[in-house]
Image (spheres, grey):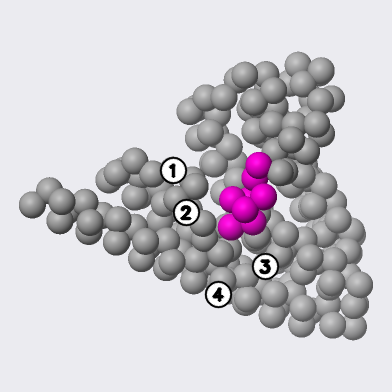
Amino acid sequence: MIDGLIKTKIDPLWEAMATPLVRARMTPNQVTFTGLILVTLVSGLYLWHGLPLVYGLTLALSFVFDALDGAVARRRNMRSRRGGYFDAMVDRYQELIVLATLGYMHNAWPLALFALSGSLFTSYAKARTAIETPVHNDNWPDFFERMERVIFLCVMLVLAGALPAHSARIATYGLALFALLAHVTALQRARRASQMLGAIDRDRK
């Protein structure tokens, strides 16, 4: 939702921030893969240092880097279907890594699994619809999309670090709220898809 509302304003900012990567002649896929490595690295470091504030801040920086692949693709005129697919797959693995890390560190495996399933269903709801009929990202202005999920996790970790006496509670309630919002969004997308496909079926009769 946020990405759709401010896309025209934020894209020039991403493209400006991508200048060093463009000058380094990095390809969009290399930027995407580097983002995955950074998320994996900072998650692994969290297992070692156990500081939610540090994890939240370094995770935010990692996700900012990950957002630059599209800007590099535009700047270098290297947009491709293969790159879009690779980026989407990496996004899912990044969420898996982060939520698994949180599940382990906060002994909240059921909540982490519930949160991950919500994210995956949200993605699958649109992807499965695209098999039946062409869809466009602008047609899916949902509440808890990837950018919202990333911001939510980073803010949750920063709050947990800033309030150490309530760190465990913030992480637990945060994961529960994340899971709830993700599944509500998945159902929101499923409802829209059902309406779209139903209208197509009626037109074909």
Q: Quadrant of the N terminus?
A: bottom right
Do the CB atoms of the residues marked 1 and 4 lie less than 8 Å apart?
A: no
- Per the model, the C-alpha gap separating discs 2 and 4 is 19 Å
Determine the main secondary structure of the stretch shown in magenta. Answer: helix
Q: Secondary structure at mark 1?
A: loop
Q: Is 4 placed left or right of 140 in the picture?
A: right
Q: Position of residue 197 (x, y in %)?
A: 26, 54
**In the image, residue 30 above or below residue 42:** above
**How much space separates mark 1 and mark 4, taking CA atoms?**
25 Å
The residue pinned by badge 4 equals: 180
Closer to the chain start, of discs 3 and 1, is 3
Query: Label for residue 136?
Result: 1
Above or below, comparing residue 186 to residue 45 in the picture: below
Q: Look at mark 2 in the image and give the residue it sits on.
A: 140
Whichever of labels 3 and 4 marks the residue nearer the N terminus, that label is 3
Q: Which disc is residue 103 wearing?
A: 3
The x, y position of residue 187, in whole percent, is: 42, 68
Estimate the spatial distance between the alpha carbons at disc 3 and disc 4, rounded to whole Å. 16 Å
Residue drawn at point x = 80 percent, y = 52 percent: 60
Q: Which residues are magenta?
A: 1-8
Per the image, is 195 magenta? no
Q: Nearer the viewer, mark 2 or mark 3?
A: 2
- What distance separates the C-alpha of mark 2 from that of mark 1? 7 Å
Q: Amino acid at mark 4?
A: Leu
Cα distance in 3D space between marks 2 and 3: 29 Å
Residue lying at 50% horizontally and 66% vertically, measured from the top left: 185
Residue 106 occupies quadrant? bottom right
User: Circle 4: is it few (<14), some (14-19), or many (20+) Cα within 10 Å?
Assistant: some
